[in-house]
Image (cartoon, helix red, strand yellow):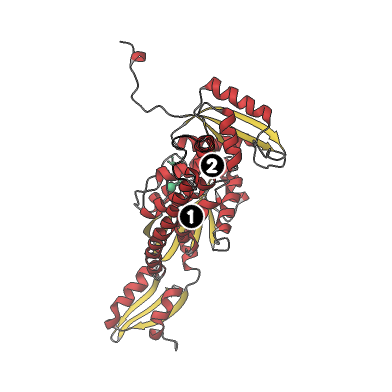
């Protein structure tokens, strides 16, 4: 039997056609944007079979693309036997339903936002993450119900058996009401979960460790960095939005000082606003960090645009002014000349490779500089009965000199801001 005669049992993946617009003043080349859209489609488990682009000044109100392009799309979908068409820009509900009718053949018409919501739905694991995604999905769906129920509405105006059910309230209205109810109940549930998170996060912010958050473009290697620095064992994968839920781990710097590091959901160009809104509480980990590490994929040609997108989202969540450093990851993919060029262009950035740990020492050095920036140098006399304070200094600060005297430990230490208050009464000022 030849290999070709085996029947594959793998699920057949959906076949997608991508549609992108070359906007007149766009700074991002359409093909690049479509490359990213293709990766999103693959991350959702589908396959790209074709692309269509059009140069436009602004969207056509009724159909988004011109009527000639709609016909072209119809023909392309037919020829390629596609199941779904993905627009790289947001469609209004009426454009979506118009296109769905025009293209016909029960082909789904979706946009980048719907695709991202779908991927988030596939990835959400924690209860909070699932609630956040469900909420964003239903909010997206609500104004789009008309298209889905238009055939039923038609039945009702025609009259006859079945059309009299639910008099005074069309199926569409019933469904809208059900969805609104569901949205309210999700909001309530989310509030409860968020309150619990606030308690946890407050206890973390009261924790004495310096808190670092990894933020950055999706697939830049945030989870890999967490794994390289700590034995976190977080899933890292070559797909977009592999991580949704935040993970926090502790890291001890070479001098012994303890930090916490949090890995979070990635950002992307044209990230749906509703999703940023929905994930605000997850992203609050970034907002409350003492230091944000902005992770950039150094091997990506679009690195500069990624930085812009990351800065935009950080501003949107109110973290634009937080202390931050930039880390170029994946420098194992660059040769030494490219590395030198990158470092010369961004003298303040850290170069690192999570894959090979290249640059680990300078990353740890930099973290140490940042973590000790607000330290106070103190001379202390700590009574032996307060031995735990000495441990506290060793774990969260740096003990520089230690002399055991008869009346206690004579210590010189660099003390982090949040510990100074606890230790001040043992300070010796007359030396
Ligand atoms: N060559 C190379 N590949 C890397 C490096 N760091 C990460 N990768 C790869 O890049 C891909 C994405 O890594 P992740 O750590 O999942 O990226 P992430 O930023 O957490 O991505 P999301 O969670 O999807 O936002 C994976 O295939 C990693 O193996 C690196 O330093 N060098
Ligand atoms: Mg990740």
Q: x and y percent of residue 419 in the render?
A: 41, 75
Q: Which residue is mark 2?
A: 146
Q: Estimate the spatial distance between the alpha carbons at disc 2 and disc 1, rounded to whole Å.
A: 24 Å
Whichever of labels 2 and 1 marks the residue nearer the N terminus, that label is 2
In the picture, the quarter occupied by the N terminus is top left
Could you tell whether 373 is left or right of 304 in the image?
left
In this view, 368 is above or below 359: below
In this view, 206 is above or below 379: above
Say whether residue 253 is visible.
Answer: no
Residue drawn at the location 50% of the way across and 71% of the way down? 374
Foreground label between 2 and 1: 2
Please state which of residues 297 and 30 is positioned toward the viewer in this rendering: 30
Say whether residue 44 is visible.
Answer: yes
Q: x and y percent of residue 385 in the render?
A: 27, 83
Q: Secondary structure at mark 1?
A: helix
**Badges 2 and 1: C-beta atoms under 8 Å apart?**
no
In this view, 381 is above or below 315: below
Q: Which residue is mark 1?
A: 278
Please state which of residues 426 and 270 is positioned toward the viewer in this rendering: 270
Please state which of residues 140 and 345 is positioned toward the viewer in this rendering: 140
Q: Secondary structure at mark 2?
A: helix
Q: Is mark 1 within 8 Å of ligand 1?
A: no
**How many numbered callouts?**
2
Q: Is mark 2 within 8 Å of ligand 1?
A: no
Residue drawn at the location 46% of the way across and 65% of the way down? 371
């Amino acid at each position: 039997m030849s290999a070709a005669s085996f029947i594959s049992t793998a699920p057949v993946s959906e076949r997608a056609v991508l549609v992108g617009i070359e906007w007149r003043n766009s700074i991002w080349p359409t093909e690049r944007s479509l490359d990213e859209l293709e990766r999103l489609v693959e991350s959702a488990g589908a396959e790209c079979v074709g692309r269509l682009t059009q140069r436009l000044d602004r969207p056509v109100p009724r159909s988004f693309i011109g009527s000639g392009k709609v016909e072209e799309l119809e023909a392309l979908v037919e020829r390629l036997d596609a199941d779904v068409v993905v627009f790289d820009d947001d469609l209004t509900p009426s454009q979506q339903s118009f296109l769905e009718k025009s293209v016909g053949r029960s082909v789904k018409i979706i946009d980048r936002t719907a695709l991202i919501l779908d991927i988030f739905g596939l990835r959400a694991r924690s209860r909070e993450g699932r609630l956040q995604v469900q909420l964003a999905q239903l909010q997206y769906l609500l104004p789009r119900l008309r298209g889905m129920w238009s055939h039923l509405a038609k039945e009702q105006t025609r009259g006859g058996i079945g059309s009299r059910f639910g008099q005074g309230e069309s199926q569409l209205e019933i469904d809208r009401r059900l969805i609104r109810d569901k949205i309210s109940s999700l909001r309530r549930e989310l509030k409860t979960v968020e309150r619990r998170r606030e308690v946890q996060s407050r206890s973390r912010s009261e924790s004495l460790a310096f808190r670092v958050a990894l933020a950055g473009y999706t697939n830049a290697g945030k989870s890999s960095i967490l794994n390289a620095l700590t034995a976190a064992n977080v899933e890292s994968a070559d797909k977009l939005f592999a991580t949704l839920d935040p993970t926090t781990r502790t890291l001890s710097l070479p001098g012994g000082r303890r930090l916490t590091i949090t890995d979070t959901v990635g950002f992307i160009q044209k990230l749906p606003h509703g999703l940023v809104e929905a994930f605000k509480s997850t992203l609050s980990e970034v907002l409350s960090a003492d230091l944000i590490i902005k992770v950039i994929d150094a091997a990506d040609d679009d690195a500069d645009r990624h930085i812009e997108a990351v800065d935009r989202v950080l501003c949107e969540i109110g973290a634009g002014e937080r202390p931050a450093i930039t880390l170029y990851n994946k420098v194992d993919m660059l040769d030494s000349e490219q590395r030198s060029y990158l470092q010369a262009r961004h003298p303040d950035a850290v170069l690192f490779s999570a894959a090979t740990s290249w640059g680990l020492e300078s990353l740890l050095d930099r973290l140490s500089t940042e973590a000790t920036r607000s330290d106070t140098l103190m001379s202390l006399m700590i009574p032996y009965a307060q031995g735990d304070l000495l441990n506290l200094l060793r774990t969260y600060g740096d003990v520089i000199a230690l002399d055991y005297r008869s009346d206690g430990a004579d210590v010189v230490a660099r003390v982090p801001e949040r510990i100074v208050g606890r230790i001040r009464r043992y300070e010796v000022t007359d030396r």
